[in-house]
Image (tube, helix red, strand yellow):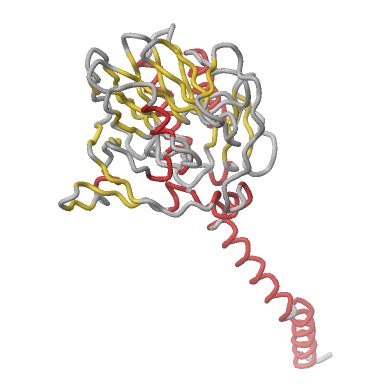
């Protein structure tokens, strides 16, 4: 065989191999389409999961059940449990999420911590329990805690840079228009509200109610705007959705495991061993569950284990991490988890 013949033979063989390796156009297009779908699914995952959690309309009311001897029905919807003569849990036992809102009364004024979804008017219910002027304070801005935007006689909001920079000031006062990522009300058909803000609460500041003081603690994680209120004299911590009996959501648009670690650390250094913790939800009748400092430590320990990959999760999306017999943490898969802290200095 001559050199030219060998060269031609080699070229022919290379061309044949190249033809064998060439992918069909339809397969390349299919791969591109699948990649695009996967990308959109990741980017839009929160909208997809919220859509799957709700129907786009408020849920049907649950049947009323026996709430026990310590509870009093205000009407056919709200139940009141007196924690002490000046502190009331206003429970929504017929609402699917079993919200618990808290009326905290001082000598001069009262504070309503959370207001449900607005399915019923909790502000009107609270007004039947005290003759003091009531200020509404949301633990965070999810739709099931802001009472569908009110109206409220007076509203106070945590003072954070990303909220302040969106504030619009007019002759009627400060106003904040909520965005979908912090509201999520589409799950139950709620439009985005605008909140009229009468008072801004700086993290670590103290709110005076007259003979009663509440410290504002920045406890992010569930959201980046979450706060807890600590009554130092009584040893009560009102924790909102940072912790409560049941599954803790840490996979939502403005959730962060890094923020959750910060919130847990803040509570561990701020509250005593005998603190009583009142969360914003329960898993069902009866009463108002009370958590303790050991539960905070359990949340903190679980976050460390997740970070170190020394704890097993169940499910696919969201992942479920066990905390203890009363709580679980729902988080995103490892490759989507956010361990940054938005305001590490607070």
Which percent across, then down, holds residue 238? 41, 22
**Residue sitting farthest toward the right:** 1
* Residue drawn at 68 percent across, 70 percent down: 31
Which percent across, then down, holds residue 182? 42, 47
Q: Is residue 306 above or below residue 25?
A: above
Between residues 236 and 14, which one lies in front from this camera angle?
236
Quadrant in the rendering for residue 232: top left
Between residues 63 and 8, which one lies in front from this camera angle?
63
User: Quadrant of the image for the N terminus?
Assistant: bottom right
Can I make out residue 258 in this image?
no
Quadrant in the rendering for residue 17: bottom right
Which percent across, then down, holds residue 262? 40, 29
Which percent across, then down, holds residue 337? 52, 42
Between residues 37 and 147, which one lies in front from this camera angle?
147
In screen coordinates, is 80 left or right of 196? right
Q: In this view, does 333 lie above or below 26?
A: above
Between residues 302 and 222, which one lies in front from this camera angle?
222
Q: Is residue 293 above or below residue 19?
A: above
Can I make out residue 21 in this image?
yes
């Amino acid at each position: 065989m001559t050199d030219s013949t060998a060269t031609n033979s080699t070229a022919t063989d290379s061309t044949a191999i190249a033809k064998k390796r060439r992918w069909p156009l339809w397969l390349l297009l299919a791969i591109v389409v699948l990649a695009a779908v996967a990308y959109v699914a990741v980017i839009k995952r929160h909208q997809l999961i919220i859509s799957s959690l709700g129907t786009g309309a408020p849920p049907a009311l649950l049947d009323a059940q026996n709430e026990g001897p310590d509870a009093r029905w205000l009407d056919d919807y709200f139940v009141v449990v007196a924690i002490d003569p000046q502190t009331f849990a206003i429970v929504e036992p017929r609402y699917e999420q079993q919200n618990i809102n808290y009326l905290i009364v001082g000598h001069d004024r009262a504070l309503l911590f959370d207001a449900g979804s607005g399915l019923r008017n909790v502000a009107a219910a609270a007004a039947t329990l005290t003759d003091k002027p009531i200020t509404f304070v949301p633990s965070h801005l999810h739709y099931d805690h802001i009472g569908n935007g009110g109206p409220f006689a007076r509203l106070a909001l945590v003072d954070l840079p990303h909220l302040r920079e969106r504030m619009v000031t007019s002759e009627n006062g400060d106003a904040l228009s909520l965005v979908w990522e912090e509201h999520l009300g589409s799950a139950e058909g709620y439009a985005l509200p605008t909140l009229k803000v009468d008072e801004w609460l700086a993290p670590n500041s103290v709110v005076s109610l007259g003979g009663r003081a509440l410290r504002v603690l920045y406890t992010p994680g569930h959201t980046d705007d979450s706060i807890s209120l600590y009554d130092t004299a009584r040893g009560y911590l009102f924790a909102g959705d940072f912790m409560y009996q049941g599954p803790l959501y840490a996979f939502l648009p403005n959730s962060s495991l890094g923020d959750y670690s910060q919130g847990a650390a803040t509570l561990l250094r701020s509250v005593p061993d005998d603190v009583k913790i009142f969360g914003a939800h329960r898993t069902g009748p009866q009463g108002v569950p009370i958590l303790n400092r050991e539960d905070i430590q359990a949340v903190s320990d679980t976050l460390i284990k997740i970070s170190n990959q020394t704890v097993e999760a169940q499910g696919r999306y969201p992942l479920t991490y066990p905390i203890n017999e009363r709580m679980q943490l729902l988080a995103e898969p490892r490759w989507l988890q956010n361990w940054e802290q938005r305001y590490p200095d607070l």
